[in-house]
Image: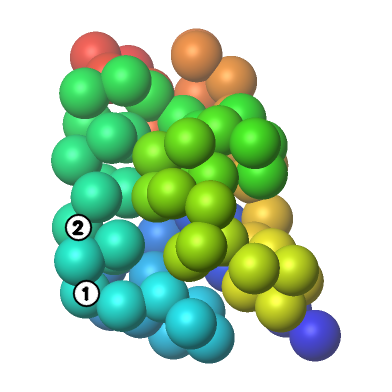
Amino acid sequence: MEKTRINLANPEELLEIPGLHQAESDTIIRHRVAHGPIADAAELTKILGGETVTPALLEHVDFQPASPTAAEAPGA
């Protein structure tokens, strides 16, 4: 199973993650722009709220790269 790189995915790619809807996709994009990459499942849960981030959703997500110097980081 191929995972979606949550720190690199565009809005359309984020919507391909099972269980993720437009509002959550928009929230992820806004967070990445303002704060940089999402480090892990705990941070994603904080951003989206606990009910949205299910184990099934996490099976489809890859957090790499998640470095403040990665290309998707603000100002990079």
Q: Is residue 25 left or right of residue 64?
A: left
Circle 2/circle 1 CB separation < 8 Å: yes
The residue closer to the viewer here, 15 or 70, is 15
Where's the N terminus, which quadrant? bottom right
The residue closer to the viewer here, 19 or 49, is 49
Q: Is residue 29 left or right of residue 49?
A: left
Image x and y of residue 66, in percent: 60, 30
Which numbered circle lies on residue 26? Answer: 2
Which numbered circle lies on residue 57? Answer: none
Residue positioned 64% across, 68% down in the render = 54
Question: Does the rendering let one see residue 7?
Answer: no
Q: Is residue 64 left or right of residue 75?
A: right
Which numbered circle lies on residue 22? Answer: 1
User: For the residue marked with disc 1, what is the amino acid?
Assistant: Gln
34 lies above or below 12: above
Question: Does the rendering let one see residue 35?
Answer: yes
1 lies above or below 75: below
Image x and y of residue 59, in percent: 76, 71
**Helix, strand or loop at disc 2?**
helix
Q: In the figure, residue 31 lies in which quadrant?
A: top left
User: For the residue marked with disc 2, what is the amino acid?
Assistant: Asp
Residue positioned 53% across, 86% down in the render = 18
